[in-house]
Amino acid sequence: MINLANETRHVSVGHLSLFVYPWRQLEQDAQSGDLFTCHLVQEAKALVDPDDYLAQLRRTFCFRPSYQQEIDRASDLGWYLVLFGDDLNSALLAKRVLWCVRTVLIARSAEQRVPVFAPQELAKRTRSQPARDLLTRRHHQRNDSGLRQALRMFLETELLSTPPPIGADRSMFLTQFVETSNKVALQTLKQEDQSRADYL
């Protein structure tokens, strides 16, 4: 839902999960080529929209010249998961591994001005066998080390990304996540800490 307030809210009632987004923020994000807003512009369908906000959003949207920043953030979190993901619960690990792979592939498709978001379509378009496997078998049960190994292969082969230096620790990643405003990575660390606290 779109509203004219200034903050994003999440409302959950039973099986209904609803996100309420401020119009001003969506409009700014469209002007800056944000990938989530790109997804809305490309695939959203209006259920009730008497003021034609979706059409306005589509007219406002402009692609960025480069989505390297999004790729770098996904890569940074990816390496954290490869090195320290054994501490995450399995569901969160699987969700974040997929986020990393999808973000990289979506960002690349947006750079080519043909954005793709559906996992099956991303799997068809990538040359990376680990990415194809992760995307097409995302609902299958996998062991955590297999997920992390597939992610490592994706980072090394698809991104030609080199592992962090030997001795890299969590604090190095935390500093990097804060400096790059990596919201998904910071949220992951917060959920990891919360999970540990709940367990203790």
Image (cartoon, rainbow, N blue to C red):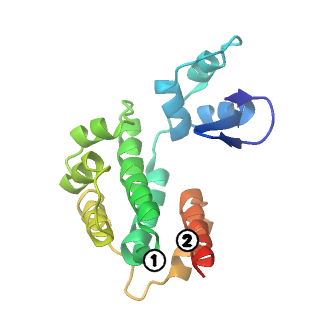
**Residue 192 tag number:** 2
From where the camera sits, is residue 33 visible?
no
Q: Report which quarter residue 21 is drawn in.
A: top right
Give how far across and how far down residue 189 sits, in percent: 57, 69
Q: Report which quarter residue 28 is drawn in.
A: top right
Residue displayed at 29% across by 72% down = 145
Give how far across and how far down residue 12 sits, in percent: 66, 42
Residue displayed at 46% across by 65% down = 77
From where the camera sits, is residue 43 visible?
yes
Mark 1–mark 2 CB contact (< 8 Å): yes
Position of the N terminus by quadrant: top right
Residue that extends furthest to the right in the rendered view of this protein = 5
Q: On the image, numbered disc 1 is attached to which residue?
A: 87
Residue that extends furthest to the bottom in the rendered view of this protein = 167
Horizontal side, residue 118 vs residue 24: left or right:
left
Of the pair 110 and 132, the residue shown nearer to us = 132
Residue displayed at 36% across by 53% down = 101
Residue that extends furthest to the top in the rendered view of this protein = 50
Q: Report which quarter residue 162 is drawn in.
A: bottom left
Horizontal side, residue 8 vs residue 75: left or right:
right
Position of the C terminus by quadrant: bottom right
Q: Which of the two discs, 1 and 2, labels the residue nearer the N terminus?
A: 1
Query: How many labels were placed on the picture?
Result: 2
